[in-house]
Image: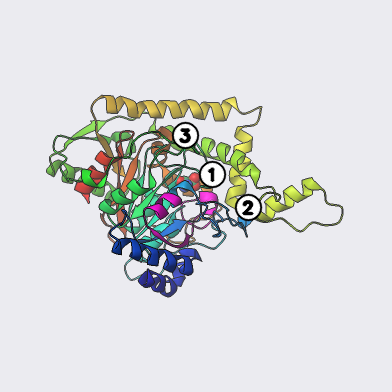
Amino acid sequence: TDACLDAIETAGALNAFVHKTPDLARDRAAAADRRIKAGDAPAMCGLPIGIKDLFCTQGVPSQAGSRILEGFLPEYESTVSQKLIDAGAVMLGKLNMDEFAMGSSNETSTYGNAVSPWRRGNDDAALTPGGSSGGSAAAVAADLCLAATGTDTGGSIRQPAAFTGTVGIKPTYGRCSRWGIVAFASSLDQAGPMTKSVRDAAIMLGAMAGHDPKDSTSADLAVPDFESMLTGDIKGKKIGIPKEYRMDGMPAEIEKLWADGADMLKGAGAEIVDINLPHTKYALPAYYVIAPAEASSNLARYDGVRYGHRAKLARGDGITEMYEKTRAEGFGHEVQRRVMIGTYVLSAGFYDAYYNRARRVRTLIKKDFEDVFAQGIDAILTPATPSAAFGLGEMTEADPVQMYLNDVFTVTVNLAGLPGISVPAGLDKKGLPLGLQLIGRPWEEGDLLNTAYALE
Ligand code: GLN
C-alpha cells in the first residue's frame, strides 16, 4: 500500500487518481495485516486497488467525473466496493473517468483526461488510456495499484484494457450488483475488474460478483470459484469467428492480430469455426439510441436540489431557471448531447421510429448470439478495438461519431447482456498494445476466463 501511494504521487501527471484516500488506505492495510497474522485472510486481503469514480464510496467524493456531483459525499458504499472491502482489498482512492461514463478517451472528464503510461515509439505525444474507465486502465498499467474496478456500458472496461495492455472483463448483465454505482444506461451497465492478468481478473471478479437484493436485476446465482477453473485446457472448445466483424478498411495489423489469436487457440486444441452474426451492423446505431435514452432518464435526478452543484441564481430566477442554469453549468458537452439525443428519441413523435426500432434491433442482435451458441459455439473471438490507442486531442468534438466508432466491436456484447473479456495480444508496429476480445455464453465467465487464459 505504501509503495502504491508513493507511485501515485510520482505519477501525478497521469491524472489517474482524482481523489486519494491515503489515511483510509493505511488503516485498511493495517487491518489486513492483522487478519493475515490471525490466519483469517480473505481472497484480496491487503491488496491495494483503485475504484472508478462512478462507484459511491462512503464519505469519499464520488463525482462520476462530473462537475454536477461536486461536493457529493455518499452516505453509503456501493455493493461491489463493499464486497471488495469485505474481501480485504485496500482502496487507494478514486479513479478518473469520462463524465458519467460517456466517452472512449477520458476526455469528457471534469478533472481533465487521464493519460496512458504508453508512448508511440520515441514520440512523446500523450495518448489516451481509453474510456470511460481510462483512469482505471492507466493506474493498473502504470503499477499505481494492483487492480481497479471499471464499468462497461458499451465497452468502457474492454477498450481501455486493450489500449493499455491490461485485462478487462465485463461480466454477464446481472452478475455484479449495480446498487450504488451511478447509473448511465441501466439495462447495459455492468461493473467488472481491470487487472494485470487473467488470474487476477478471476480472483477479483469472484470478490465483486453475487446476488444483491438491492438490485432487482442482479442474478440469484451462485458465484463459482473462477480461479480454480483456470486450467488452460481448451481442447475441443469451439471458437467462432464472426465474419461481420471484418470491417472495411480494417488495419492489416488488427487482421493479423485476430488471425494469430485464432491460431493460438487452435494450437491449444480448440476448433475454429466461421460464424455469422448478421445484425452486427445495426448494433452501433441501436446502442447510440438506447444508451442516451436511458441516460436522459437517469440524469433527470441532477436538478441542483438533491446532489452536488447548484448554479448561482440571479434576482427573479425561479425553479426553472435554477434547473436550467445548474444543468448547463454542471454537465459537460458530451453529457448534454446525450441528454438531447435521449429526450429526442423518447419524444412522443419519434419514439416508435427510434427507440422502439432500436429495441427491436437489440432483440435481433441477442438472437444472433443465441443462434450461434445453440450451434455449439463456446466463445467468439474478435478484435477488442478497431485500432491501438490514439493521441489525446486527435479525435475532436467536432465529429462525435468518429469517437462512437471506437465501440464497434464491444457494444453488441452489452446489447445482448453477454460476458466479454479483452486480453492483451501483442504490440503494434509502434510498440502500442492491442487487445483481443472473447465473448462467452451467459453466466459462463469461468469458461471465458479459462479461454482467455489460454490466449494470454
Ligand atoms: N464509449 C461508449 C459510450 O460513450 C461506452 C461507454 C461505456 O461503456 N461506459 O457510450
Residue kind at label 3, given as amino acid type: Thr
Residue sitting nearer the eye, 118 or 4: 4
Query: Residue 217, which numbered label?
Result: 3
Q: State if disc 3 and disc 2 touch (CB < 8 Å).
A: no
Q: Residue at x 34, y 42 (%)?
A: 420
Dot 2 or dot 1: first in sequence order is: 1
Q: State if disc 1 and disc 2 touch (CB < 8 Å).
A: no
Helix or strand or loop: what does disc 2 sit on?
loop
Residue sitting nearer the eye, 276 or 97: 97
Q: Residues within 10 Å of mark 1 (few under 14, many from 20)?
A: many
Q: Position of residue 156 (x, y in %)?
A: 43, 49
Query: Residue 183, which numbered label?
Result: 1
Q: Is residue 347 magenta?
A: no
Residue sitting nearer the eye, 382 or 254: 382
Horizontally, residue 165 falls left or right of residue 97, namely: left
Q: Position of residue 231 (x, y in %)?
A: 17, 45
Helix or strand or loop: what does disc 1 sit on?
loop
Q: Is mark 3 within 8 Å of ligand 1?
A: no
Residue sitting nearer the eye, 266 or 416: 416
Residue kind at label 2, given as amino acid type: Phe
Furthest-right residue in view? 316
- Mark-to-mark CA distance, 2 and 3: 28 Å
- Mark-to-mark CA distance, 2 and 1: 15 Å
* Magenta-highlighted residues: 82-108
Q: Residue at x 33, y 58 (%)?
A: 45
Check the picture and name the quadrant holding the N terminus: bottom left
User: For mark 2, what is the residue?
Assistant: 331
